[in-house]
């Protein structure tokens, strides 16, 4: 596999180094069940990996890789470690997790500050929107100059997307020339803030964005699933810690292959995916609405696509002052990405995959169900409920 710039390649024949993994969950001590899982992993010869977990629809490939036995097929024993989205970087830095997936745009600044991860493959496109009231006089991004935009956080991926689009429309978004106002609200309060006129637009990820759009009759000025400038750009990518990439590249490659295969399966089976992940309580909410949202994304995984998205984000975030002035986007992407010789750019399509062949051993995976987790992720998280008809919503 080739790419522009310096290649960070790992030969397929490279033997995995011995890797001793801590089973301590975030801030806690190892439990008897953790010790038992470690013993089972050792007995089976599988490599134990700690996967970041929060109830996120975007992360469907991770859950399908578990339920369809793709991790197990690759010789991996997965423990899911619940981490609040606001503390993902801390968990990675504290060596509490080994693998996961995340929004590329949000992780670039932490990467610049030394976050020890390597992206390995793009997983899907879509999942972020910038919305205005349906009867608003705001018809384009250019109309947002001087307006107030509600966001979940100043470093949120939706904020980054908004800044990129605003800058492209000639609106200042740097500290030296800020021509819009970003106001932070709780993700659950954004739609109401827009309805009440406290802000002129809101930027957030799905499913909250899609729910608000339908319930309040909102119009999307930006929809990364369909807009020409974003629809082919991977928003979310799989990553491994730099430690795992260095000490056990074989396991890092195996993880990447498993989630690629699972992502492709989600692409071909969105209805079945929604059914599985809700029944197994990885996410909670309406099955049909989950499936509806999944169908708006492109879950065709791509190693090169993930790299290209990372580089594109680095270029534009440098231009608008999110990354340091003078950042070389190619070098940045090369340092933050890893290409494996034994990982394809994307798995071959297999639309004939029979869900009945799923591994029954997946039930041995250790995880905390979504119903018991309170963490809120940047996109596609929380209880996903089809919006009820709101007779007071603006048409």
Image (cartoon, rainbow, N blue to C red):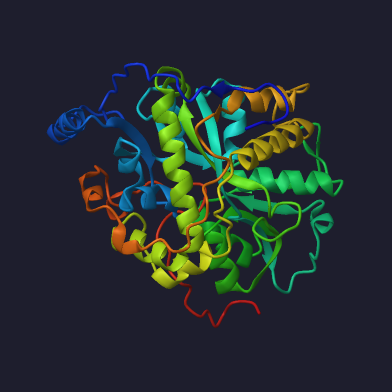
In the picture, which quadrant includes the C terminus?
A: bottom right
Most extreme residue toward the front is 13
Q: Position of residue 159 (x, y in %)?
A: 65, 45
User: In terms of depth relative to the viewer, which is nearer, 132 or 28?
Assistant: 28
On screen, residue 8 versus residue 175, left or right, reads left
Is residue 273 in view? Answer: yes
Image coordinates of residue 298 in percent, x first then y, are 58, 57
Residue 277 or 150: which is nearer the viewer? 277
Horizontal relation, residue 3 to residue 123: left or right: right
Q: Give the vertical position of 186 relative to 319 (above or below).
A: below
> Picture quarter containing residue 16?
top left
Rendered view: 291 above or below 50: below
Is 242 located above or below residue 207 in the figure? above
Which corner quadrant of the image does residue 216 belong to?
Answer: bottom right
Q: Residue at coordinates 14% horizontally, 33% vertically from top-left?
A: 36
Q: Residue at x 60, y 22 (%)?
A: 8
- Report whether 291 appears left or right of 306: left
Residue 101 x %, y %: 48, 40
Q: Give the total number of marks visible in the rendering.
A: 0
Residue 199 appears anywhere in the view: no
The residue positioned 24% from the left and 29% from the top of the image is: 28
> 306 or 386: which is nearer to us?
306
* Residue at far bottom of view: 391
- Residue 284: x and y, percent? 35, 61
Quadrant location, the N terminus: top right
């Amino acid at each position: 596999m080739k790419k522009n710039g310096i290649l960070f390649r790992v030969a397929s024949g490279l033997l995995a180094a011995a890797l001793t993994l801590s089973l301590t969950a975030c801030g806690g001590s190892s439990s008897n069940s953790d010790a038992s899982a470690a013993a089972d992993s050792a007995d089976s010869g599988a490599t134990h990996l700690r996967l970041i977990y929060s109830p996120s629809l975007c992360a469907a490939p991770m859950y399908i890789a578990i339920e369809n036995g793709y991790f197990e097929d690759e010789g991996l024993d997965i423990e899911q470690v619940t981490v609040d989205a606001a503390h993902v970087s801390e968990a990675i830095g504290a060596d509490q997790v080994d693998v996961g997936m995340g929004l590329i745009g949000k992780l670039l600044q932490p990467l610049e500050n030394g976050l020890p991860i390597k992206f390995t493959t793009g997983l899907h496109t879509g999942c972020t929107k910038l919305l205005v009231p349906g009867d608003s006089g705001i018809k384009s991004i250019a109309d947002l100059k001087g307006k107030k935009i509600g966001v979940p956080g100043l470093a949120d991926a939706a904020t980054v997307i908004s800044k990129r689009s605003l800058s492209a429309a000639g609106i200042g978004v740097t500290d030296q020339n800020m021509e819009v106002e970003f106001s932070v609200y709780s993700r659950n309060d954004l739609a109401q803030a827009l309805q009440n006129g406290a802000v002129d637009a809101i930027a957030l990820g799905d499913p909250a964005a899609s729910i608000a759009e339908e319930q309040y009759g909102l119009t999307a000025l930006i929809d990364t699933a369909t807009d020409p400038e974003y629809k082919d750009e991977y928003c979310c990518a799989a990553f491994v810690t730099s430690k795992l990439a260095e000490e056990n590249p074989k396991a890092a490659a195996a993880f990447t292959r498993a989630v690629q295969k699972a992502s492709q399966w989600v692409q071909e089976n969105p209805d079945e995916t929604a059914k599985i992940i809700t029944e197994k309580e990885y996410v909670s909410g309406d099955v049909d609405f989950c499936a509806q949202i999944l169908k708006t994304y492109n879950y065709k995984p791509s190693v090169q696509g993930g790299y290209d998205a990372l580089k594109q984000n680095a270029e534009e975030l440098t231009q608008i002052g999110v990354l340091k002035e003078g950042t070389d986007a190619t070098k940045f992407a090369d340092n933050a990405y890893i290409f494996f010789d034994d990982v394809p750019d994307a798995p071959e399509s297999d639309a004939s995959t029979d869900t009945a062949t799923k591994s029954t051993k997946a039930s041995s995976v250790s995880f905390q169900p979504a119903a018991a987790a309170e963490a809120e992720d940047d996109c596609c998280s929380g209880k996903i409920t089809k919006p009820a008809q709101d007779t007071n919503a603006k048409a």
